[in-house]
Amino acid sequence: MADAEQSLVNGVTNLSVKESEQSKRDGDEFKRDWGFSLQELYKLAVRFFKEKDGKALKLTYKDKLRLVAYTKQATYGKYRNDVSPEVGFLDVVGNDRRQAWQALGDMSQTTAMSEFVKQLDSLCPLFRPFTEAHSAEKQEQERKRQEEEDRLRREAEEKERRKLEEEAQRQLELQKQKQLEQEMQIRAALNQQTAGQFAQYAQQQYPSSKQQQEELIRQLQEQHYQQYMQQVYQQQLLHQQQQYQQMQQQQASNIAPTPTQQTPAQQMAPPPTQQPDGQQTQATLQQQANTVIPNGPIDGTSEKKQEGEGQIPPPALLMPASVWTRKDIQSFKDSVKHCQENVIKIGSLATATVRVPTHEDGTCLFWEFATDYYDIGFGVYFEWTVSPSTTVSVTVSESSDEEEFDEEQDTKNDVEQGAKKDDRPPTDEIIPVYRRDSHEEVYCGSHAYPGQGVYLLKFDNSYSLWRSKTLYYRVYYSR
């Protein structure tokens, strides 16, 4: 049998050889040299053989028998009687093709494909340009497909962005509506208190003109409202200063600070008494300046000093943030990770703070973030200060804010170093720091600008002793 494997059958070499070890190497070789997998290249070769046979492809009888045998072996495997039935004695071509297929023996289908391609390439010089043209066409189709996918992805991202902006705009409109309703309620209460007094004064000033009386009443009511809101704001600011001073005193004596509760009188001051000329009396102004709150009197010097240092005092009302989540976490990471500035590595026991100054053209801040594999703590604060630029900056600290604060207090209490003044601007909490499952879904949120200042986005990993976190985030504003 060993001699039979090397014999000739009707001039066709018996090609039954061992090729199991070569099949894998051949597949890699075809992918590298031709740009197609073996199956794809074999289909192209069969197509070329059928289209060009007898035209651009001139083959001898023996070469054609060999190629036909390879196609049979690649399609059906080892010779089968049911596929190639018995032929007549005078059918020379049929007998030759059957014997050529039988001569391939147990050759694998993969090896048969490989041999067909190699034989066709050696017999016809036009085959390689034919495959190169199809390879270029395939690359062009792949490029167009990739461009179409990118276009659809960008459209989906833009659609999602517009949807988020519309939702945030709707939330902003609701917040503005609530503020307007609150303002109308305050104005109505103030106008009800002073209606008789203002009407009597206007009648004395313009006894013969109803129109001038109504105009004067509107002016007095507007002045009254502005003075009332100024008084509310002033008392809240004084209360914040008092709390801050009390906290400093308690820390100086190594006593843990206890939170003070705001009394109803501090939450909303009563309307000032309005004189007929629209101005407050000196006694009323003096009484407001010497307002006493439960934790002790506060003079006006600290307020002037704070305003003189360029810090922005907080308003009377800080609106809550809007938060939501979405499930497309992988597409969000893919859209963010191409920008290295939006990917942060937060080590164990560390905290990252993203400082986002308010923009003069913006009215609302948006944020989105996600992490790999594990959750992370997140919170939002607003710092009432004037930022010299609108650049977003990131700070990663190796310890929590509480530990840093304790170290500062230790330095303050050091008699040799002396007392150190804390010039940090006032900061309000918008969202407290809690752990978020940002490895399972994208966490999003928005907040209407309360004024000019800097948003502090806190990403807290201080609770993790061993694991570092990879954070993907994005912030932007809307007009």
Image (cartoon, helix red, strand yellow):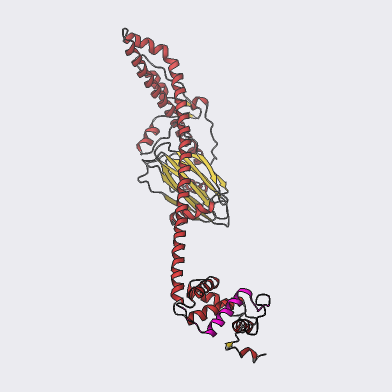
Number of marks drawn:
0
The one nearer the camera, 458 or 256, is 458
Q: Residue at x 48, y 50 (%)?
A: 473
| Rendered image quadrant of residue 299 | top left
Residue 64 falls within the magenta-colored stretch:
yes
On-image quarter of the N terminus: bottom right
Residue 69, percent from left and from top: 59, 80
Residue 232 falls within the magenta-colored stretch:
no
Residue 373, percent from left and from top: 57, 55
On-image quarter of the C terminus: top left
Q: Work out whether 209 lies above or below 313.
A: above
Q: Residue at x 68, y 78 (%)?
A: 81
The one nearer the camera, 169 or 24, is 24
Q: Would residue 94 be seen by someone viewing this image from the given angle?
A: yes
The one nearer the camera, 440 or 376, is 440
Residue 212, percent from left and from top: 32, 13
| Rendered image quadrant of residue 105 | bottom right
Q: Would residue 418 be seen by someone viewing this image from the given angle?
A: no
Q: Work out whether 225 lies above or below 436.
A: above
Residue 429, percent from left and from top: 49, 39
The residue segment tinted magenta is 56-85
